[in-house]
Amino acid sequence: MTTSAAVTLLFGLPWLLSSMIVLTVAAGLVTAPFTFDSGADDAVSNIVGWAVVVGFPLSGALPLWGPVENTIARLLFRFRPPSPQERQRIDALWAGVARRAGIDPAAYTLWVQDADDVNASAGAGRTVGVTRFALAELAPAHLEAVLAHELGHHLGGHPWARILVYWYSLPTRAVLRLAGLITRLLTRLYSLTIGAMLISRSRNTGTAAFVGCALLLVPAFCVLPFLLPLVPLVVAAPVDAWFSRRGELYADRVAADLGYGPHLADLFQLWQAQGYDDGHTQAGALERMMSSHPALHARLTALQRHAQRSGA
């Protein structure tokens, strides 16, 4: 496991703590109607407590289980299995990468994403995906270099760490979505009420406005206890982004060590000429600091330095 993957897991601890609070409260609400005496209440509380404290952290193994991994690939990453023609091309290129890396190519599952941009990603478990556009438009050597980069992410433990953190964040994200839905409904009701009062020229408009504003704050106060563990993530977000960029450079180095350095550098230069780096060069300092990917010129420089150090 690389340092960037370890830092990703470290930043996942607040999500885990927040979600465990959510699950504890939810379990208490569900089991409350079924406890009528102190003995039963203690037994149920112990079962629920152990289920949350032990069961939920252990559930992090589920995204690495084949059926769940495939479901995540389809639903979260919007991947699909390659068509027969796509399969023929991607399998041949992946076999070349696997041969250089000394791994079994069948150990990873290859997917295609229906997107019209040049991109690839390393998903949960042993998932490797490329966009339809990249598969159709990239030269074989360039596409093979991109696949080697994604393998570098897997070898560094980056996808496993990211999907584990995402898994542990799901209960908290569900609460945030519910709070957002309630807020939108209250806002709509508030607007309709104030609008009706203005039309009827009611004298209670001011009171209704005050009460409505107070009600809109209710969802925020309800979710606040669950969000407190996430405060460190807001403060340390630039650090997390920096390590994410380091993870990208690590995957580039893995591809270079497999012999794809020149092809990767050639692809980066091609993308620069096509304006792919314009967003980074035009972004402000804060936006660059929060970016999860390094600029192409930085990746090129890092590849050149790595080649000099390795004597390639």
Image (spheres, rainbow, N blue to C red):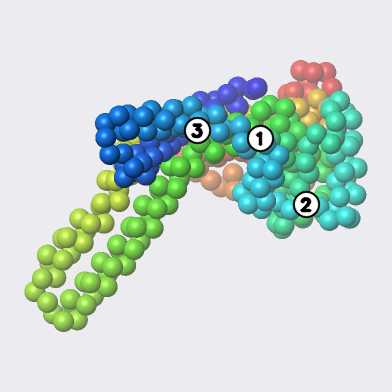
Query: Mark 3 highlights which residue?
Result: 56
Compare residues 11 and 178 and report the one nearer the observer: 178
As displayed, is residue 178 above or below residue 12? below
SS at mark 1? helix
Query: Mark 1 highlights which residue?
Result: 64
SS at mark 3? helix
Where is residue 267? Give x, y as percent: 78, 42
State yes or no: discs 2 and 1 in contact (Cβ < 8 Å): no
As displayed, is residue 132 above or below residue 43? below
Q: Quadrant of the C terminus?
A: top right
- Spatial distance from mark 2 to mark 1, Cα to Cα? 18 Å
Tell me which numbered mark, 2 or 1, is placed earlier along the sequence.
1
Tell me which numbered mark, 1 or 3, is placed earlier along the sequence.
3
Disc 1 crowd rating (10 Å Cα; few below 14, some 14-19, many 20+) is some
User: Closer to the camera: disc 3 or disc 2?
Assistant: 3
Residue type pointed to by label 1: Leu
Residue type pointed to by label 3: Phe
As displayed, is residue 1 above or below residue 241? above
Query: Mark 2 highlights which residue?
Result: 81
